[in-house]
Amino acid sequence: MSRIDTLPPLREVIAKHDLAAKKSLGQNFLLDLNLTAKIARLAGDLTQADILEIGPGPGGLTRGLLAEGARKVLAIEKDPRCMPALAEIADAYPGRLQVINGDALTVNPLDHLTKPIKIAANLPYNVGTELLVRWLTPPAWPPFWDSLTLMFQREVAHRIVAQPGSKAFGRLALLAQWRADAQIVMELPPEAFTPPPKVSSAVVHLTALPAPRYPADPGILNTVVAAAFNQRRKMLRSALKSVSPEIEDHLTAVGIKPTERAEQVGLEEFCALARSLA
Ligand code: SAM
């Protein structure tokens, strides 16, 4: 049994605190502490950073983050059953782990953390994409975080890093790549989790760029991209008609063929279109 600290193995923790996984909370636990330490290392140097972790569960990744030297971890967990197990970890790392029993969608991490801040999580699949979109669309850029190291279903991870011309390319890729560098850094089979989910997973590492890759108004870019991909099989001149009656002129002015479909158009061109429409 792998060990990264003097705390008991996770199987014992789960048995002791009766933490049978609940499907409704997206609970698929990582019990191999070598693996959770490896994921923690993928987040980069933690020693000078505060870490936000969503959904610590029995605390495998939390232990990895602390063992790798995180200055402080704020762990937000919805399931009250996990609190005693997480309290034991907090005792083993005095003053470095704060646990909040609550919904990650309603807690403001800035009330508890000091910059620089990194986010690392084996996310609950039911709220993973919503959280990512929130972190990528703050009111101002740069955001409160420096990097995100996040587990997703493999298919979602591929949508985040997708390039034009691929089926996976869409809103999520454009949103992520406009203001961040995004890379898949680890792929995991279902058996890495207890219980195993139906699909494979992947860890995506995103680093916030100091400024967007190409200038564009975030609201206009979002409207254009949403309209273009809502009807991704249509030519852009019809998919974007609702955005502007002169859409053909704008498309031509920035060098996009009006007969092209959204998935053929790259980030730089979408930003140019947003500027033309502004
Ligand atoms: N980090 C643990 C691990 O790697 O073993 C658990 C990961 S499990 C995929 C997701 C965790 O998120 C569960 O512990 C679940 O209870 C928690 N969770 C689900 N929805 C949540 C929410 N809205 N806010 C905070 N935690 C949530």
Image (cartoon, rainbow, N blue to C red):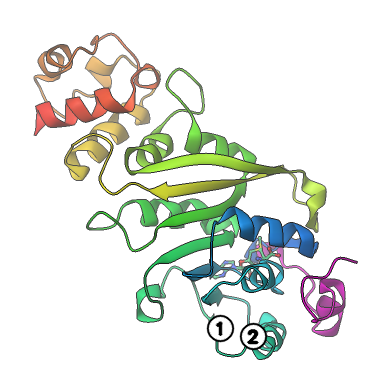
Q: Is residue 8 above or below residue 227?
A: below
Instruction: Please report contact status of discs 2 and 1: CB closer than 8 Å, yes or no.
Output: yes
Return the residue found at the far right.
Answer: 1
Horizontal and vertical percent position of residue 156: 55, 41
- Residue 242's quadrant in the figure? top left
Say what amino acid the circle numbered 2 marks.
Answer: Tyr
Magenta region: 1-24
Q: Residue at (69%, 63%) from the top-left corner? A: 27
Query: Which residue in the protein does label 2 denote?
Result: 93
Q: Is residue 150 above or below residue 23?
A: above
Query: Which residue in the protein does label 1 denote?
Result: 96
Q: Is residue 103 above or below residue 266?
A: below
Residue 242 visible somewhere in the drawing: no
The answer to which of 72 and 178 lies nearer the viewer is 72
Left or right of residue 127: residue 30: right
Horizontal and vertical percent position of residue 153: 63, 45
Image quarter in which the N terminus is found = bottom right
Q: Regarding mark 1 in the picture, which secondary structure is present there?
A: loop
Q: Residue at (65%, 56%) from the top-left corner? A: 39
